[in-house]
């Protein structure tokens, strides 16, 4: 097994990865800018990478991003968490087309299990504390998913795929646009018999199925020469069969439990350009409604969370001969509702907050870039808080770029943490927000003879007042958690046919007692290569993902205990062939070497599995 891994690693290392010149991001400052202008650590996954590697779930690609740790409790559709630089899963803010989609019906984290790679233009991953721009939830970073906008004559596609575990998916896209209007509609139906959520290595054999229906709409119109109107809508309906924990032994065992998840979100916005574009104003209103119904033989629950957000942003640009200045002001009003009922209890609560942001940006001679931002959050349940962030980037010469940032993060206790979900839960009015401070420093080398770069970034984070929740109450942990490490990224594109990306993360994440935090491996690495063959129609893409040894906690009545999860390496291989201008066939093999591994203690993982399919596309 190790020999095969080494051979594939050598094969991929001998190839090269993709770099996108002037990659555009908006997450760092809510204003479009190239990646090279950004002092913060950011990674971009583009549509080409998703399509070349036949990505079904976005988490498959996120595993390749430095600083990210992914944990899934079973097969496809099982609860999936992402931790950025050792932060908790609910300390990552997730946006889809500008809408915050963290699920506040539970602990305000986003369940990546239901996020399909459906007509996505790019995924931006911003690492480090970003609360000064994005508020609560952005303690560890921000993941921003942007779907494709309609362009050109009306066109569409349909995709049919089938594979292991009786997994089937049917998807469609419909897009078009001109200078006045644009629209994009996409949808997908996915269902799978799945595997046993409880590990089969421990004698469990009952398969736990999953189904997902997703529908996206994105449209806009140019109402006048300087007024743009936009609307995005998203609906997700998922059904997941699950297994249960045996608290006598702390293991996961077969069970007929299941959960139904639904999320509806949308945003309407208007953007006004004045003074020849030097003064931009945008106002938007977004709504997210998340619902999770859980059923078992002994316990049923219904959790409903709603979030409504009104925001206004103003950008003012000042141009001089040597410099460009930007002044940004943001005002936000957010209201949240939490409505929970179960076999044993009922909880109904709400909260609201107001955020005010001011940011200054400087572009000096296209060589030095500086931003500084401050935010004031006014809360109805907690003390008002202030956060800040600054970033700096500089071209030292034509090849070397320096970038650094420092920021603070704040994570307000969720309504779930404050009031719990059982009749025995004791509210804690003294529960304080979690907070952190993150500093990173990176050096990037750009190759002069090929399109690509290598980046090395050091980071250090101090976390205070981490919230710990059990069946009876929630409390703030004493002391400071220390997280520090290194991120290495290589992005190269030596020819028009050859792409390669590589990443490595060293993450030393310890709590106040100097114990490594659970589900955060010290070493994580990834390689991906994609080669278009000489016929110009066939592309072969392959990847390796290494996850080092990590720890987990087993919860049992006899007492909790700490366990070690072994390291593992996963390989995948994808082939696409353009049969004609309108027909593409594809195949993919995951876990190519049938690695036996465990991401979360007691839960199963998929063995070697495959997908084959066909995509039909064309103008209408």
Image (cartoon, grey):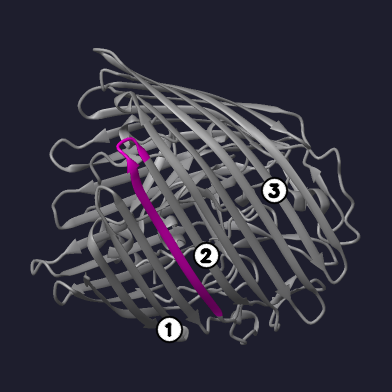
Q: Secondary structure at mark 1?
A: helix
Residue beneath the point at 10% across and 66% down? 536
C-alpha separation, residue under disc 1 versus residue under disc 3:
41 Å
The foreground one among 550 and 366 is: 366
Mark closer to the observer (1, 3): 3
Reading the chain from its start, which is encountered first: label 1 or label 3?
1
Reading the chain from its start, which is encountered first: label 2 or label 1?
1
* x and y percentages locating residue 384 in the rendered image: 72, 28
Q: Which residue is mark 1?
A: 164
* x and y percentages locating residue 120 in the rendered image: 37, 58
Q: Secondary structure at mark 3?
A: strand
Residue 235: give its label: 2
Sort mark 2 into few (<14), some (14-19) or many (20+) by Cα contacts within 10 Å: some
Residue beneath the point at 35% across and 66% down? 5
Residue 61 is covered by the magenta coloring: no
Question: Residue 361 falls in which quadrant of the image?
Answer: top left
Question: Residue 513 falls in which quadrant of the image?
Answer: top right
């Amino acid at each position: 097994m190790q020999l095969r891994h080494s051979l594939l690693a050598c094969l991929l290392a001998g190839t090269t990865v993709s770099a996108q010149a002037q990659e555009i991001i908006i997450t760092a400052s809510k204003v479009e800018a190239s990646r090279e202008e950004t002092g913060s650590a950011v990674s971009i996954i583009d549509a080409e990478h998703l399509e070349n590697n036949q990505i079904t779930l976005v988490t498959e690609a996120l595993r390749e991003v430095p600083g990210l740790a992914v944990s899934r409790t079973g097969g496809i559709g099982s609860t999936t968490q992402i931790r950025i630089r050792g932060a908790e899963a609910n300390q990552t803010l997730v946006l889809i087309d500008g809408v915050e989609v963290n699920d506040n019906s539970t602990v305000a984290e986003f369940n990546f299990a239901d996020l399909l790679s459906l007509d996505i233009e790019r995924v931006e991953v911003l690492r480090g504390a970003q609360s000064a721009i994005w508020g609560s939830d952005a303690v560890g970073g921000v993941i921003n998913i942007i779907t494709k906008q309609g362009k050109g004559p009306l066109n569409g596609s349909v995709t049919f795929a089938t594979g292991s575990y009786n997994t089937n998916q049917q998807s469609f896209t419909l897009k078009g646009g001109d200078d006045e209007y644009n629209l994009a509609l996409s949808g997908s139906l996915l269902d799978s018999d799945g595997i046993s959520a409880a590990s089969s290595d421990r004698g469990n054999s009952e398969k736990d199925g999953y189904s997902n229906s997703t529908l996206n709409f994105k449209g806009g119109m140019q109402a006048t020469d300087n007024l743009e109107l936009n609307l995005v809508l998203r609906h997700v309906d998922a059904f997941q069969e699950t297994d249960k924990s045996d608290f006598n032994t702390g293991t996961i065992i077969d069970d007929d439990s299941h959960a139904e998840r639904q999320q509806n979100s949308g945003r309407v916005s208007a953007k006004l350009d004045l003074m020849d574009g030097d003064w931009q104003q945008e106002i938007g209103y977004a709504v997210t409604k998340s619902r999770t119904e859980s059923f078992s033989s002994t316990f049923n629950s219904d959790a409903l969370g709603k979030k409504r957000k009104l925001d206004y942003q103003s950008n003012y640009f000042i141009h001089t001969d040597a410099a460009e200045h930007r002044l940004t002001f943001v005002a936000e009003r957010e209201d949240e509702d939490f409505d929970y009922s179960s076999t044993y209890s009922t909880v109904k609560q709400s909260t609201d907050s107001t955020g005010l942001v001011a940011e200054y940006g400087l572009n000096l001679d296209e060589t030095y870039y500086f931003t500084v931002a401050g935010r004031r959050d006014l809360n109805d349940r907690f003390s008002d808080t202030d956060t800040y962030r600054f970033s700096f980037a500089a071209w030292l010469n034509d090849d070397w770029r320096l970038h650094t940032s420092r920021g603070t993060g704040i994570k307000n206790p969720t309504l779930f943490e404050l009031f719990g979900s059982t009749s025995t839960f004791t509210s804690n009015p003294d529960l304080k927000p979690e907070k952190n401070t993150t500093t990173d420093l990176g050096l990037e080398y750009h190759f002069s003879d090929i399109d690509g770069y290598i980046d090395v970034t050091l980071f250090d984070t101090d976390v205070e007042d981490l919230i710990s929740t059990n069946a009876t109450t929630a409390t703030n942990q004493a002391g400071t958690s220390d997280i520090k490490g290194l991120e290495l990224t290589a992005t190269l594109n030596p020819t028009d046919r050859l792409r390669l990306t590589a990443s490595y993360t060293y993450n030393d994440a310890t709590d106040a007692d100097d114990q490594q935090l659970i589900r955060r491996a010290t070493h994580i690495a990834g390689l991906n290569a994609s080669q278009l063959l000489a016929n110009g129609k066939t592309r072969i893409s392959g990847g390796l993902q290494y996850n080092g040894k990590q720890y987990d906690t087993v919860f049992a009545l006899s007492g909790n205990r700490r366990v070690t999860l072994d390291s593992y390496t996963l390989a995948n291989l994808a082939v696409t062939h353009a049969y004609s201008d309108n027909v593409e066939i594809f195949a993919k093999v995951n876990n190519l070497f049938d690695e036996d591994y465990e991401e979360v203690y007691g839960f199963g993982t998929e063995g070697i599995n495959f997908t084959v399919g066909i995509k039909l596309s064309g103008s209408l």
